[in-house]
Image: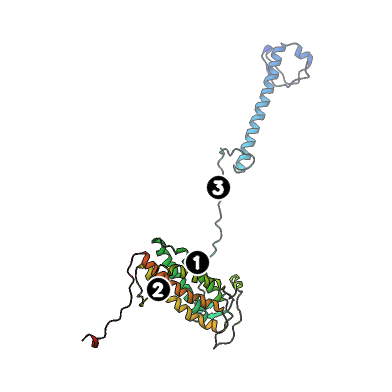
Amino acid sequence: MPEPLIAGATVNKGQLKQTKFCSQETVSKYDFTAFLTLQEMDVARRALRKSLLTQVSEIISFSRYSSNTPNNPKNEPSTVKEKPVPVQAPPQVHKERVPRIGDDGFAVTLMGAVKPKDDQIFHAMGSCDELCSFVGLAREYAHDNNHTYVEYLKRIQTLLIDISVAISNCNYNSPNSPPVSPTVSPSPLSIKGTSFSKRHAAELEEWIEEYSESLPPVEHFVIPGGGQVCAVLHVALSICRRAERKVLPLVRDGNLDPEVLVYLNRLAEFLFVISRVASQADGAIESVYTPKPSPSSSS
């Protein structure tokens, strides 16, 4: 027989209300079946009380933490409404979208030298950039018309950017001003230097020979026109000649590789040839210059 049991439970038989622990002698006076029922009921009440306390503890713990904590691994919705925590907005950081660099009429070369915007270096760079833009415009038109030299024009644009970098890397000082030392850190592009390979001009010569075979000889001055692509290529040709004139002083003074001047001269020849190819590919009639008779000879 087990040791004394918990008091406080009511025994049906005999209407005995126990207020103290029961001894073995007291238990033997009652039906043992009723005593087992009393013990089982007490154990059930304890288990129920423990279960309720556990659930209340879990609810309180759940209300303190978010649903992502280990206390709620299944991300089940909370039955307790959480008090919203005010979110502080991040501090406003003013970003300068317009740098306003160069408002004073000066610009910085890749070498870090500050020069006026009308300096010889920026004139040469600007002409090369303008030439690169018009070659790109001609490339887009040529692509729309399925011309065969589109990739050649893209290659030319890449080399024109290299020429602009080489010009900006010139260790050049304006003739009428004192030498200007670098005032800011040089750009990483300055490591390219001012050299330019001879193979680039040789590449253009190969393209000129390739496309000249399908063209009739030039017997008169060609008037710019002959289709949209041809007209844009003629504009690029004119800008290329201007770039030559702007680059020449830098080459002559020993500040720039002479191969840059050779390339621009060869590029002007290629642009003229390819403009005629474009006119032929578009089925346009090439316009040539025909001198008008003087008034005295017509009378």
Counting residues from the start of the chain, the first of labels 3 and 2 encountered is: 3
Report, in whole angstroms, how far the alpha carbon at label 3 lies from the one at label 2.
Answer: 67 Å
Which corner quadrant holds the N terminus? Answer: top right
Q: Under tag 2, what secondary structure?
A: helix
Depth check, front residue: 165 or 146? 146
Residue under the image location 43 percent in, 62 percent down: 148
Q: Nearer the viewer, mark 3 or mark 1?
A: 1
Tag 3: amino acid: Pro
Instruction: Find residue 84 and name its label.
Output: 3
* Earlier-in-chain disc, 1 versus 2: 1
Residue 130 visible in the shown view: no
Instruction: Determine whether the residue tagged by mark 3 lies in a helix, strand or loop.
Output: loop
- Residue at label 2? 235
- Residue 83 position (above or below residue 203): above
Q: Between marks 3 and 1, how big is the CA–CA gap?
A: 61 Å
Residue at 75 percent of width and 14 percent of height? 27
**Image position of 38 with respect to 289: above or below:** above
**Residue 11's x, y, as percent?**
68, 15
Check contact, mark 3 vs mark 1: CB within 8 A. Answer: no
Residue 251, picture quadrant: bottom right
Around disc 1, counting alpha carbons within 10 Å, would you say few (fewer than 14), some (14 to 19), or many (20 or more)?
Answer: few
Determine which of the numbered discs, if any, sits on residue 155 in the image. Answer: 1
For residue 53, side relative to residue 166 (left or right): right
Q: Is residue 250 above or below residue 161?
A: below
Q: Position of residue 261 (x, y in %)?
A: 51, 78
Circles 1 and 2 in contact, beta carbons < 8 Å: no
Check disc 3: other Cα within 10 Å, few if <14, some if 14-19, many if 20+: few
Nearer to the camera, 206 or 128: 206
